[in-house]
Amino acid sequence: MTKERKENVQRILAWWVDFVQHHARNIVIGVLLATTLVLFYSIKHFNINLDTSNMISSKLHYRQVENDFVRAFPNLTNTIVIVIDAKSADLAVSTRDRLVADLKKKTDLFTNMFVPGGGLFFDQNGLLYLNTNELQDFADNMAAAQPFIALLAQKMSLSGLFSVFGTILEHPEEGPLKDKRTLTLFNEMSRALENAAEGRPYLMAWQELMLGEKENARQRRQFIIVQPVLDFTKITAGQEPIDAVRAMIRDLGLSKVDGITVRITGDMALDAENLDEVRNSVSIATAASFILVAFILYIGLWRSVRLIFSSLLTLVVGLIWTMGFAVFFIGSLNMISITFAVLFIGLGIDYSIQFCLRFRELIASGSGFQESDVTTAKGVGRGLLFSCITTAIGFYSFAPTAYAGVTDLGLIAGTGMFISFFANMTLLPALLTLFPVKENKKSFTFPVSNLVKVPYIYPRTIIITALVLGVGAATFLPRVYFDYNPLNLYNQKSEALQTIQDLFKDPDVAPWTVSVLVKGEKETKALAKKLSSLKEVNMAITLFDFVPELQAQKQSILSDVRLFMPRLDHVSLKPAACRQDAAALNAFGKIVHKVLLSSTGDAQAVLLNLQTNLQRFTVLQKDPEQGCKAFAELEQGMLSDLPDLFKKLRLSLSPKTVHLSDVPKDLVEQYVSTDGRYRIQVFPKENIVDRDALVRFVNAVYSLTPDATDSPVTVYEAGVAIISSFRFAVVLALVAISIFLLVTMRSFLVTLLILVPLALAMLLTAASSVLFHIPLNFANVIVVPLLLGVGVHNGILFTLRYQTEPPANGNMLKTSTARAIFFSSLTTMTCTGSLAFSTHRGIASIGILLTLCFGFLIISTLILMPAMFQLFGNRIKSSRQA
């Protein structure tokens, strides 16, 4: 920029501020009315987009495959997953069925429902899905339990149960106490007696006792997957269905005290919790930022109420206009762009500080009010315009990339910088005209007068130290990495996140699986076989896997079991009178005492505990009413579920031959698309929460098919796209800002001197991210391009002041520009620092890295730059004539 052009810019700014002074009242009234309209419009149309998938450009191949998958399987997206964990399979299944019954009543809130392994089909045919060895073990368990089941089926009452237990203990020649299952049986009975005596509900784990621990362990965890009806006109579209599920859990009285844990996860629950965290974090950070900025202004602007009021009002107006721009032109905010408010407060107030401090400095030096206003616009305005442009470049640098989520933030915040500049060149001078600052002849002083001399006394030492620090920090660059896993950004204490992390530990129920769509049965089976053979794959499932293998052989095994099992389909509970139960209990107690005297080892410990609880329960019989109540609770806990279990057992022993056409519709919809393609579901062998394991798994699947999709692919490909976008944005911002500096400063040396402190700050920030374990992630990648734009801001203002109005004593740190840089950087650090306390890790990482960035920038600008000016001052001054 030539000298003539510089003067033209200054004249335009001076003319504009002079115009504002003469029409101050009308301008303020007009601005406030317009701001009010914008505010009402923004509030009415404000919306936050929960769909994180749209944060990456839909033009990428993986996004096209992903969108095709969503269209083919609309029932697999926007789901709520209810995870039920219970101490026994009986309790887990019964809890699941109760919840399913309640969910089916809420047709206004839920559409599709899928219960893995649930329903009549699996009740009857579930045993066919065991392999032959597992099924033979089941048959052996049934053979061992047959005498007990037969006796219990004939005497389905408490008195009959005590009689059966007594019979078992009275036949030591059969070695019942050496059988682990028998000991487990008496342990369960002991717990039932203990809980009944204390009035606590307890269900006896009959399924575990009869089917064995392995089969029971599989069913202790049950799932219900529901798809809610979503109202996207609401910000929290999925919150009402989630609240309804929580209400059902409360109404059913399901709690850990009863041995039941019901948790909610799934993409809708994660998104809802994530949205709450982001909204709360940003709302609190925005409020805290405004308060802290006001406090810093109180100190930095010499406690001038008028200057503080004018600055804050200008900031609020700029913020509202920027929000109006976002709502009108962007349409909605996403999880990242919502942070624009905090960034705007931190960066936008900088313009007001620069303007007000320069204005106050002129007033203090004896200049007239109007003259000071115009001179400030001429002196500071050009620097603010240049810094506004460079900051916007940093924000806009993501616009040409595939990372649409940060592009929105860049467009909003970048445009916000121009809005802030306009507000500070219009509203702020108008306010200062209407509310003139009292003249103060007090001279400008820097609070640390000795420190400001250091860069001018030891310039070479400071430059060498900075060089050493830069080289040392550069050695950490190879250790900077990108964290692919978006779950690491969420609040780690949230229920939905902790639940899904728990599920990741079980490879059979991995919540993230890869899906591949294939046309044709033959092609599907062939590809599934190849995928299953990969070392990174645990298994690959298709619809055809739900037609059991070796059905004839398995039905033969179950036919043998049916031959020796009693009839179980007509068994019913036949309660006896209290006195009969009491008599049977006393008789059983005597048998326990007799056998205990001759028992040893584990059997002795089990029987001793059983005897203790029998005695505690017998004490209750002294009060007939209390005794009958205790027997009723004991009967409920020990026998209430047994008739249904016997019926299910009888049904499972008579499976039908399963054909593909027999597979339930809700299961078919999980594996056959609406257009007839088959889905292969690929399970990872490793826990893909680990970044390296995720990369290995996705690349292994890619080696066989490039059209894989679903969560692991989306996470991996989104990470790749963001890394590519990050690199492009950094290069673009650096090149654009460098060219802009060269054009405006017309000096390679001056451009270099402005960029050197920025480079040092970036290197120190990168090293800090490694030392403090803050990797780059989906949220904080905006930091580096933003730093490039904002980082040269201070350098531009510092250099222009040095070139146009150098201090008489030669010490730039004693000028209002240095003071403004210090306090504006401090306000920016304060604002971004408020984000660092967010429970949302993504938001917090933005705050931490930006706070570190601006901290290093303050040091670089106020220490390194003066030192460089001391050594190259004459050449810098001479460049202004170019």
Image (cartoon, rainbow, N blue to C red):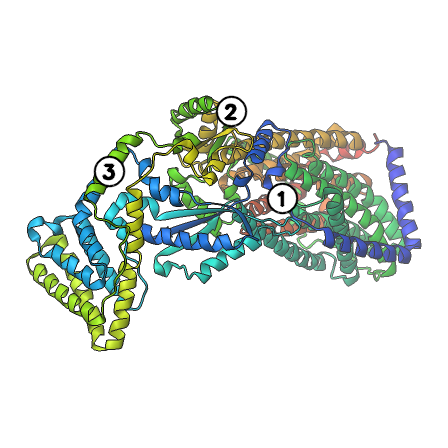
Q: Nearer the viewer, residue 405 or 30?
A: 405
Q: Secondary structure at mark 1?
A: loop
The answer to whether residue 119 shows anywhere in this view is yes
Q: Which mark is residue 157?
A: none
Q: Is residue 232 above or below residue 676?
A: below
Q: Which mark is residue 559?
A: 3
Q: Nearer the viewer, residue 458 or 722?
A: 722
Residue at (61% x, 50% y) in the render: 237
- 636 relative to 84 in the view: left or right: left
Q: Nearer the viewer, mark 1 or mark 3?
A: 3
Q: Name the spot of residue 173 as percent of width and height, x first.
A: 6, 50
Dot 1 crowding, Cα within 10 Å, few <14, some 14–19, many 20+ = many
Q: Name the spot of residue 190 as percent of width and height, x first.
A: 22, 60
Q: Rounded to the nearest whole Å, what is the CA distance between mark 1 and mark 3?
A: 61 Å
Three-letter code, disc 3:
Ser
Residue under numbered circle 1: 336
Q: Rounded to the nearest whole Å, what is the CA distance between mark 3 and mark 2?
A: 38 Å
Q: Name the N-terminal-most of marks 3 and 2.
A: 2
Q: Nearer the viewer, residue 536 or 209?
A: 209
Three-letter code, disc 2:
Lys
Q: Name the spot of residue 368 as percent of width and height, x first.
A: 89, 55
Residue under numbered circle 2: 519
Q: Rounded to the nearest whole Å, what is the CA distance between mark 2 and mark 1?
A: 38 Å
